[in-house]
Amino acid sequence: MKILVTGGAGFLGQQLTRALLDRGSLRLAAGDAKIDRIVCFDQTAGALQDPRVEYVTGDIADPATVRRLVDADTAVVVHLAAVVSGGAEADFDLGMRVNLDGTRLLLETCRAVGHQPRVLFASSIAVFGGDLPPVVTDATTPTPQGSYGIQKLIGELLVQDFSRKGYVDGRSVRVPTVVVRPGRPNAAASGFASGIIREPLSGVEAILPVEPSTKMWVASPRAVVKMFLHALELTPQDWGWNRSLNLPGLVVSMEEELAALREAAGEQAVALVRHQPDEAVLKLVRTWAATFDTSRALAMGFRADADFAAIVRAYIEDNPDAIRLPGVRR
Amino acid sequence: MKILVTGGAGFLGQQLTRALLDRGSLRLAAGDAKIDRIVCFDQTAGALQDPRVEYVTGDIADPATVRRLVDADTAVVVHLAAVVSGGAEADFDLGMRVNLDGTRLLLETCRAVGHQPRVLFASSIAVFGGDLPPVVTDATTPTPQGSYGIQKLIGELLVQDFSRKGYVDGRSVRVPTVVVRPGRPNAAASGFASGIIREPLSGVEAILPVEPSTKMWVASPRAVVKMFLHALELTPQDWGWNRSLNLPGLVVSMEEELAALREAAGEQAVALVRHQPDEAVLKLVRTWAATFDTSRALAMGFRADADFAAIVRAYIEDNPDAIRLPGVRR
């Protein structure tokens, strides 16, 4: 069988592709299905090379392009391609085009092949915002306060209805803030939560634009990839009619992040983090939810990271070339 | 100023247009604004004739058509045009085209004129469904169980974000089942709630496809038109950031409807209603919410009908030509 990963050249797409290759198969309705080919669709090709991996580049909102991505062998689609929060807020039309039109086009394409592909949609906890309760539960109403969250929530609703109609077998997971995100900073407003770990470990200064007491709901790339695979392997019955789910994570303050950084790389690392409040970021972060009760996901077998120190250790293990500060414990 | 009413030839559009003409002005930000022109957009022209009313016919999802509907004088847009529940379920693509693409196109057109028109979007209690609490409150998460509800909820999210961005001054109201809907039966799955009053009063047999104990959340056309005007005249501050609202209504069982029919037109009328269960309708109706706590709307000044007998009396008053059963109290 064939798997399509949109956003497949991004860091999460690459880690997911690596994990799929390592497994070699996925447990689907008919039993273990061998992975013959993974199509990684993105704006550029990725670094990961394997005979089973094919890179296709193009525009996720272009019908002719997307129609070529899904065929009779495509049993699984993982839809990661998106304009991130800061980007969708800065360029409304681009966000609508990629996050809404792209998602709808992909679902229509899956519908057109007629064999009900299993579709995993990476949504986000950015669907929550505004007047939130202290703990967000499975019953909390999503009320996004930004275009990114709005567009992700619309994507979920489309996945929900396309699944109910039997056009796809869809699942939407609301991903916590992914920390530590490797590579260069992106336009996500939450980027500092990764930056204050990643930059010091590579010997570079980082800015903390919010109060150190600011809490966030986070998960490591490793945990997220594992949860993606779990979401794909659950049966339609496991999911039931409600195809949207808040994923487990850890609630962590920026202080706790810095403590874990200190533990891994010493005071020299923490000294590279400069506190410089940014009103624009603060305003956005205040509307985010930090603490979740993810009972439904836990009952379905999803698991978060053990603690934040483990997240930092995993980052160091997975990104040896990015660790340039001397004396970091490996 | 100019007002655009999409779905303006429909019965609700016509009653709203009549009410706007009778008033002659709307209380907007700058004070009372005189209504110079009402553009009623629909697939056909309506019966109501007035020098201030202009009918434009066409396709709500056609960009060239919709762009011509909104100009520098258009201060208010009321978006009623929609494919109803049964129709959107039977023809998925038509529902997506009219209910989603049409709504988005209208919002984009309002954004393009640049003066932030006040937009009222008629959403529906069909956004609620599935595993609902006994009483739906302002905090209950919308979980639509049909394509119509999904598309209406997506429309709300677009209205929400276009308002937050300052592109329009939008308000979405979730309209209860409108009873008694005059005219011919339409494709709405809830149509029987009107049919069992309307048909007997015109001397025709009606089918009740659900248990007589079935309860629904209803409002009369008169009450809905009043609530539309109120929704338009509230300030952006009255609305706050949350631009979606459950409208007040009455909870009424089909038995209670028949009792009101008996009161107005005697046993002869009730004898024209035949109970004939329809599994398809039953299945859908079971997922609907019947009882609401609409505290927020009540605090904002929205009011429901007094009781169901008043709804029947209003129907008889407003539709004298449709009452053909002898001996109906007027």
Image (cartoon, coloured by chain):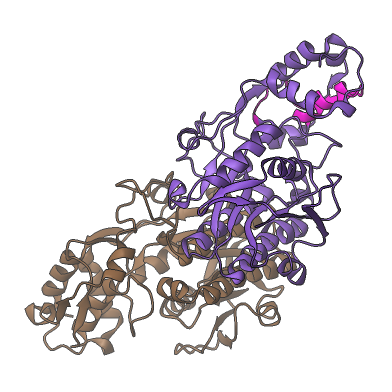
Chain colours: A purple, B brown
Quarter of the picture holding the N terminus of chain A: bottom right
Up/down of A126 relative to B253, above or below:
above
* Residue at left offset 53%, top offset 67%: B26
Looking at the picture, tell me which residue is in the foreground, A104 or A54.
A54
Q: Name the residue nearer the viewer: B43 or A220.
A: A220
Q: What is the x, y in percent for residue A300?
A: 47, 38
Which residue is more in the foreground, A298 or B142?
Answer: A298
Q: Say whether residue A146 is left or right of residue A137.
A: right
Residue B221 x/y as whole percent: 36, 71
- Total numbered circles: 0
Which image quadrant: the C terminus of chain A? top right
Q: Residue furthest left?
A: B267
Determine if residue B232 is in view.
no
Query: Is residue B162 highlighted in magenta?
Result: no
Classify A209 as above or below A64.
Answer: above
Is residue B48 something that shows in the picture?
A: yes
Q: Is residue A26 above or below residue A118?
A: above
Identify the magenta region: A192-218
